[in-house]
Image (cartoon, rainbow, N blue to C red):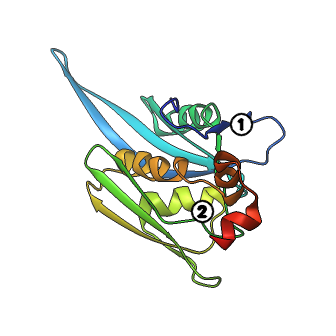
């Protein structure tokens, strides 16, 4: 699922205190020759609020089991996101389908300036100060995946210094 990203660290859910956030539940309809068959699809974000996050989709005939399936799916797709204290290391844009998300680091005390699906993902990661802008599609599935696209492209100063083969001090001096 995350093979397109270079610095993705997959995480096992064992031993983590994961909290789940329901992003959205949709009622879906399948039209058959016997009439309409109703079901539900749920998208959930789970995270430990300390840099580990995952998202999942669950479908079922009733809401509760759709949410339970989504949580199980989310726990299978956990990744570690590099954070800089309570904000992001740098500005990043992400896209998925018609959804576009821009994430900007913010000064301490700013709070999470984000709406809907982006807010759920950022709070699950453990970001406390961030500015964001969501453009294009407002479909929660695509917005969550666009936010993940942006988060998975983030690189900490330590990773950048290691990739360039220089020390952190030299990285900051320029």
Q: Name the residue tied to disc 2.
A: 123
Residue at point 25% right, 32% down? 29
Q: Are marks 2 and 1 in contact (CB under 8 Å)?
A: no
Residue at point 59% right, 75% down? 129
Which mark is first along the chain, 1 or 2?
A: 1
The secondary element bearing badge 2 is classed as helix
Front one among 1 and 6 = 6
Front one among 115 and 150 = 150
Residue 47, can we see it? Answer: no
Q: Residue furthest right?
A: 15
Residue at point 63% right, 85% down? 109
Q: Splitting the image into 4 quarters, where does residue 106 fall?
A: bottom right
Residue 111, can we see it? Answer: yes
The secondary element bearing badge 1 is classed as loop
Q: Splitting the image into 4 quarters, where does residue 75 fall?
A: top right
Q: Splitting the image into 4 quarters, where does residue 84 fall?
A: bottom right
Front one among 143 and 171 = 171
**Residue 168 at what x, y percent from top left?**
74, 62
Q: Residues within 10 Å of mark 1 (few under 14, many from 20)?
A: some
């Amino acid at each position: 699922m995350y093979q397109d990203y270079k610095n993705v660290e997959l995480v096992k859910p064992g031993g983590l205190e994961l909290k789940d956030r329901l992003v959205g539940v949709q009622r879906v309809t399948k039209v058959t020759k016997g009439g309409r068959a109703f079901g539900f699809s749920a998208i959930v974000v789970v995270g430990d609020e300390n840099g580990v996050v995952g998202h999942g989709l669950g479908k079922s005939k009733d809401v509760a089991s759709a949410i339970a399936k989504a949580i199980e799916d989310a726990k299978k797709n956990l990744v570690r996101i590099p954070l800089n204290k309570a904000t992001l290391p740098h500005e990043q844009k992400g896209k998925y389908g018609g959804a576009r998300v821009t994430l900007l680091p913010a000064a301490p005390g700013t709070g999470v300036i984000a709406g809907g699906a982006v807010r759920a993902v950022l709070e699950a990661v453990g970001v406390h100060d961030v500015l964001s802008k969501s453009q294009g599609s407002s479909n929660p599935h695509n917005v969550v995946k666009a936010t993940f696209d942006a988060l998975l492209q983030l690189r900490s100063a330590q990773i950048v210094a290691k990739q360039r083969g220089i020390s952190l001090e030299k990285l900051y001096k320029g």
